[in-house]
Image (spheres, helix red, strand yellow):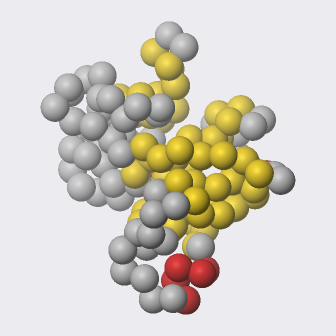
């Protein structure tokens, strides 16, 4: 899988992200420890599956550069906190909070996720 598109928002011609829960893809569509980009209600999101039933969603846009590359970031951890490092300048962000460990003035937007019936849903 290289990208997922929530068709309902696309077909409706929405230009801005619509708030609420959005169905994105099946959990099995994501590889473990690998990022994927998705277009959800007009917003670019990076998804990361870190466990059998654990998925994180963050903005696909790198806060430091504005490039849409976060799905290609490097997964890791700081203690028990899961992290993603930007593939460009290697700033490290907390996947749960968006806090940047290496540059406190930066932060990455994060989104709540849930799995229902084997399907990933994201709250925008």
Determine whether 7 is above or below 120 in the image: below
Q: Residue 99 location in percent, x, y?
A: 32, 29
Q: Residue 34 location in percent, x, y?
A: 61, 43
Residue at the limit of the structure toward the right, as seen here: 117
The residue lying toward the viewer, choosing from 64 and 116, is: 116
State the residue at coordinates (44%, 69%).
18
State the residue at coordinates (42%, 43%).
110
Q: Residue 36 location in percent, x, y?
A: 57, 54
State the residue at coordinates (30%, 22%).
101
Left or right: residue 64 compared with residue 40: left
Determine whether 42 is above or below 62 in the image: below
Q: Residue 111 location in percent, x, y?
A: 47, 47
Residue at the limit of the structure toward the left, as seen here: 105
The residue lying toward the viewer, choosing from 32 and 105, is: 105
Q: In the figure, residue 121 lies in which quadrant? A: bottom right
Left or right: residue 104 compared with residue 99: left
Q: In the figure, residue 56 lies in which quadrant? A: top right
Residue at the limit of the structure toward the front, as seen here: 20
State the residue at coordinates (63%, 41%).
55
| Residue 34 seen in the current view | no
Left or right: residue 122 compared with residue 58: right
| Residue 13 seen in the current view | yes
Determine whether 78 is above or below 15 in the image: above
Q: How many marks?
A: 0
- Quarter that holds the N terminus: bottom right
The residue lying toward the viewer, choosing from 82 and 2, is: 82
Left or right: residue 73 compared with residue 62: right
């Amino acid at each position: 899988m290289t990208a997922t598109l929530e068709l309902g928002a696309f077909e409706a011609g929405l230009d801005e992200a619509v708030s609420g829960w959005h169905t994105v893809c099946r959990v099995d569509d994501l590889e473990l420890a690998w990022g994927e980009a998705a277009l959800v209600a007009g917003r670019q999101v990076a998804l990361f599956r870190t466990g059998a039933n654990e998925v994180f969603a963050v903005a696909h846009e790198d806060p430091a550069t504005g490039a849409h590359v976060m799905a290609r970031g490097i997964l890791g951890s700081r203690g028990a906190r899961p992290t993603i490092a930007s593939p460009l300048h290697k700033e490290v962000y907390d996947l749960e909070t968006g806090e940047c460990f290496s540059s406190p003035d930066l932060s990455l937007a994060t989104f709540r996720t849930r799995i229902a019936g084997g399907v990933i849903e994201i709250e925008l």
